[in-house]
Amino acid sequence: MGIITNFFYQIVFTVGTIVAFGLLISFCRRAFCQIVGENNAKIMMITGAVGVPVHELSHALMCLIFGHKITEINLYESNPENGTMGYVIHSYNERNLYHQIGNFFIGIAPILGGSGVLLLLMRIMLPTLYFEVTDELRFVALLPTGFFDFYTYVGYLELLLEVIKDIFHFANMGNILWWIFILLAFMISSHMELGAADIQGGLHGFAYVAGALLVTDIILYFISVSVLEALTSAMTSFALSVVSFLSVSAVFSGIMLLIALAIKYSGVLVEKIKSKLGR
């Protein structure tokens, strides 16, 4: 493979997969808010007691990893006037490439951090379920990575369905810790959406990530094509591991949306029945 081909695969199957799952999670959250309507603010305030601190601490952790200075942090605001429930204000050296690249990871941090916390809670509270799910997620490494390969996307869908089966197996519902975990999972996943500031910072950082990666690919191409291809393979393998984390979050975001739809249409059905009975 040449420079452009390697660069394309590196971007699509690393940044691209993370962004794709981020968009899916954001879509589910926004659709959920639209469906619940006027109750949205109350629900977000309640779930925010857990979800917002996880969201903001994910930003803060990435700030520390990439050398940004945290100047102010608010993990949860119970009565926000401007709709912002928490924030992390940070500063950095604009001439520092590492700091600039960090903007991308700081921007997408809630997706990565929230997913990591979900798996950690599962490991602590439901170890048997954790190992069942992680066994399923190991198969992600065997999925084809062809951008135009239909079976790549079929494989991801089948993976998500298997994770859903494991998590919501009837046998788990007799365990009180399972119910607590499900509640915490919904609270966290409902606040993994990236805000406007997150997206703006992430896009700014992505330009530096892509630029640094392209320069690296060009250098490696003239040194050794095999080394360049090895880098692409390593990045793809790492990205597939990250996808394993994101799969769990995507599952809960999707289930959250389905619950909202079920509640909405059950309410509509009840109103229709009442109207017919009232005639």
Image: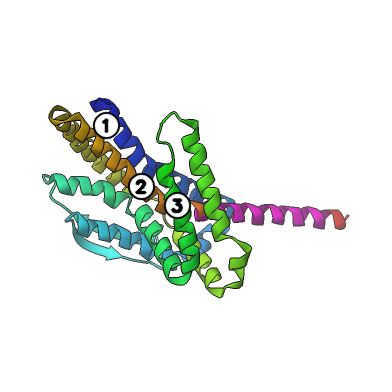
- Magenta residues? 252-275
What is the three-letter code of the residue carrying label 3? Leu
Mark 1: secondary structure? helix
N-terminal-most mark, 3 or 2: 3
Q: Is residue 24 above or below residue 252?
A: above
Percent of width and height locating residue 217? 19, 32
Mark toward the viewer: 3 or 2 = 3
Percent of width and height locating residue 178? 54, 69
What is the three-letter code of the residue carrying label 1? Phe
Q: Is residue 130 above or below residue 255?
A: below
Which residue lies under the disc numbered 1? 7
Which residue lies under the disc numbered 3? 137
Residue at image location 46% in from the left, 49% down from the top: 25
Which residue lies under the disc numbered 2? 196
Distance (Cα) linking label 3 and label 2: 31 Å
Quadrant into which the N terminus falls: top left
